[in-house]
Amino acid sequence: MAGRKRTREKRQSIMRAGGRGVPAFLAKTDWITLLLCFAASVFGLLLVHSATLRTAQAAEMPVSRDVIVMAAATVLGAAIAIAASFLDYELILRFWYVFAGVCLLMMMLLFTPLRAAPAGRADSAVWIKLPVAGGIFFQPSELLKVGFIISFTWHLHLVRNNINKLKAMVMLAVHAGLPFALVVRTGDLGSALVFLCITAGMLFLAGLRLRWFAAMLALAAAAMPAVWIYFINSFQKQRIYAVYAPQMLTEEQLKAVLYQQRQARYAMGSGQLLGEGLFKGSYIQSGSVPESQNDMIFSVAGEELGFVGALGVLLLLAVIVIRLVRVSGRTRNTRARLLCSGVALMIGAQVVINIGMCIQLLPVIGITLPFFSAGGSSNLCVYIGIGLVLTAYRHQNEHEDTESYFDYLYT
C-alpha cells in the first residue's frame, strides 16, 4: 500500500510540475481509458470476425473486409486520439468553428451525387462515397456528433451565467436544431436520437432549469406531426409501428419488418448462459441474422458467448462510460467537464439505443454499438471523441473558469 501511495504521489507531482519527457508523457496520459477502449475494440473485432467468417471463407481470405476496415479505423482513431491529447482543449474549443464547418460541409455532401450506400444498405443512404482507394464510404453524421460536442461546449461556456434567459436559450436551440434537422433530413434517425440525448444531457449539466425542459418537450410534441409526415419515410414508419403498434401492419408486413430483430432475439436466446461457442453460433454462422456485424453485433455475443459474454460487453461499455464521467469530475473548469460529459453521453446513448434495438424495445433506426460494431466511420469518430477526453485529462490542472467576453450580450 505504501509503495502504491508513493507511486501515485510521484505521478501527481510530475503532472503538477508540467514536466516534459517520457515520465511526464506517461503520467499525463489517461492510460486507463485508452486500455479500456482498446479492450473493447479487440473484443469487438473478435465478434465482427465471427459474424463475417462466412464472407471471409467465401472470398478465401483470412479475415473479411469489415474486420480490416474496423481494425484500420481503430488504429488510426487511437493515433488521432493520442495526438489530440497533446493539444490543449482550450485551443480546440476556441477553434470550434473550424471543426463545426468541416462537419457541416461533409453533411452537405449527402445532398450531392457523392451520397451512396454500401451493398445491402440501400434503405438508408447516409454515407458519402469518397473517390479514393476504389471508393471509401464515410458516414458524416458520426463526425458531426464530435463537432457538435466541441461547438456546443463552447457555446454553453459563453452563456453559462445567463443560460436560463430567453435570448441564450433561443440561440442554444438554434445551435442544436441545425445538426438535428440535417440528420433527420438525411433519414439518419439513430444519429438524430443521439443528438437529442447529447443536447439534453449537456444542457442539464450546464445548469438549465427544468422548466425549459418542459417547454422543449411541449414544442417537440407539437412538432411531431410535421416530423412524422415530412421527415420519416414509409419504411421507417413501419419499423416504429412494428414495435409499438403492430396492429397497424398486416401479418406479412410485420413479419418482414421484424425479421432482423426476431432473428437477433432467437440467436441470443439460443446462447443461454455460456453460449454455443465462439465461431459456432448456429444463427450467426448460417447468416440468419441480417447485419449481425453492424447493428446486431450484440446478438453475436449473446449466441456464441451466452449471457456471460453479453454481460461482459455491457460491463465493459459501462466501465468506459463511468471512466469518462470520472475524468469529467476531475477537471477544474466547466468547459472540460462539458467536453468529457458530451463524449460520455454520446457513447452511453448509442449503447442504450443499440441494445434496445437488439432486444426489440426500440425500432431498428440504424445505430452502431461503440467499439463493437463494424464500420470505419463509427470506430474512427468514437476514438476522436475519446481524444477530447484525453486532452481534458492531460490539461486538467492548467485552466480555471474565466469570465466570458460574451456574457454581456445575454444580460
Image (cartoon, rainbow, N blue to C red):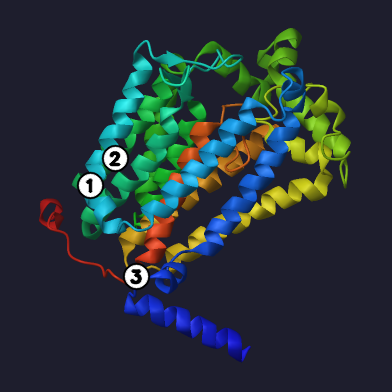
Query: In the image, which disc is placed on residue 95?
Result: 1
Q: Distance between the residues labelled 2 and 1?
A: 7 Å
- Look at mark 3 in the image and give the residue it sits on: 332
Residue 86 placement (x, y as % from top left): 35, 58
Residue 208 placement (x, y as % from top left): 34, 54
Q: How far apart are marks 3 and 1 (CA)?
A: 21 Å
- Going by the numbered disc 2, the residue's amino acid type is Phe
Report whether 35 appears left or right of 377. right
Q: Earlier in the sequence, mark 3 or mark 1?
A: 1
Is there a contact, CB below 8 Å, between mark 2 and mark 1?
yes
Residue ID at (44%, 39%): 196
So how many labels did they put on this image? Answer: 3
Task: Give the image quarter of residue 60.
Answer: top right
**Quick one: 308 or 377, which is closer to the camera?**
377
Residue ID at (39%, 65%): 394
Report whether 348 appears left or right of 53. left
Q: How crowded is mark 2: few (under 14 residues within 10 Å), some or many (20 or more)?
A: some
Asked if residue 278 shows in the view, the reply is: yes
Residue 117 placement (x, y as % from top left): 51, 16
Foreground mark, 3 or 1? 1
Q: Which of marks 2 and 3 is nearer the N terminus?
A: 2
